[in-house]
Amino acid sequence: MSNTFSNTDNPAAEADLHTTPSIAQAANDLRTAAGEKAREFVQTAESKAAILKERAVDSAQHLRETAAEKAAAFKAAATERAQHLRESATEQWQDTRVRAKELHVTSEDYIRQNPTKCVVSALGIGFLIGLIVRR
């Protein structure tokens, strides 16, 4: 068996050794390739980061629009409900005023028709309130 590395008599083998790249050249080639791959990696990472940033902006914009729509719907519902409550309260206040006036008119009529009974009742109620307050 002949070993091409140990055989220095063969000029073709010696020429092969000189034409093969040296270790330093291989290291430089490897370093260059690694640098290119690193640049490609950085570019890929930057492009993916830009895409993610764009998606985040789109998502934030969508959330903002959805929140604005929900807020507008909530405001409209709250306004409608407040208007309904205001109308209901106004109606109840009007009914209460009418009833109070009716009660006042009815009371005046009763007092005019039965003045003695009302005065005696008022004195009795006053006397009871006086007893309660003393204790």
Image: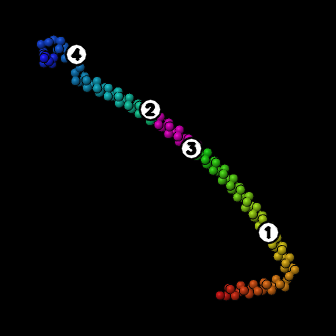
34 left or right of 6 in image: right
- Mark seen at residue 99: 1
Estimate how packed mark 3 is, as few (under 14), some (14 to 19) or many (20 or more) residues with alpha carbons within 10 Å.
few
Q: Secondary structure at mark 2?
A: helix
- Classify 128 as above or below 11: below
Question: Which residue in the structure is indicated by mark 3?
Answer: 64
- Mark seen at residue 47: 2
> In which quadrant is the C terminus drawn?
bottom right
Q: Secondary structure at mark 4?
A: helix
Q: Earlier in the sequence, mark 2 or mark 1?
A: 2
The extreme right residue here reads 113
- What's the CA distance linking mark 2 and mark 3? 25 Å
Residue occupying the point 78% across, 86% down: 123
- Mark seen at residue 19: 4
The extreme front residue here reads 1
Q: Earlier in the sequence, mark 1 or mark 4?
A: 4
Q: Amino acid at mark 4?
A: Thr
- What's the CA distance linking mark 3 and mark 1? 52 Å
Location of residue 126 in the rendering, given as x and y in whole percent from the top left corner: 74, 85
Place residue 27 in its image quadrant: top left
Place residue 40 in its image quadrant: top left
Estimate how packed mark 1 is, as few (under 14), some (14 to 19) or many (20 or more) residues with alpha carbons within 10 Å.
few
Q: Which residues are magenta?
A: 51-65
Residue occupying the point 14% across, 18% down: 3
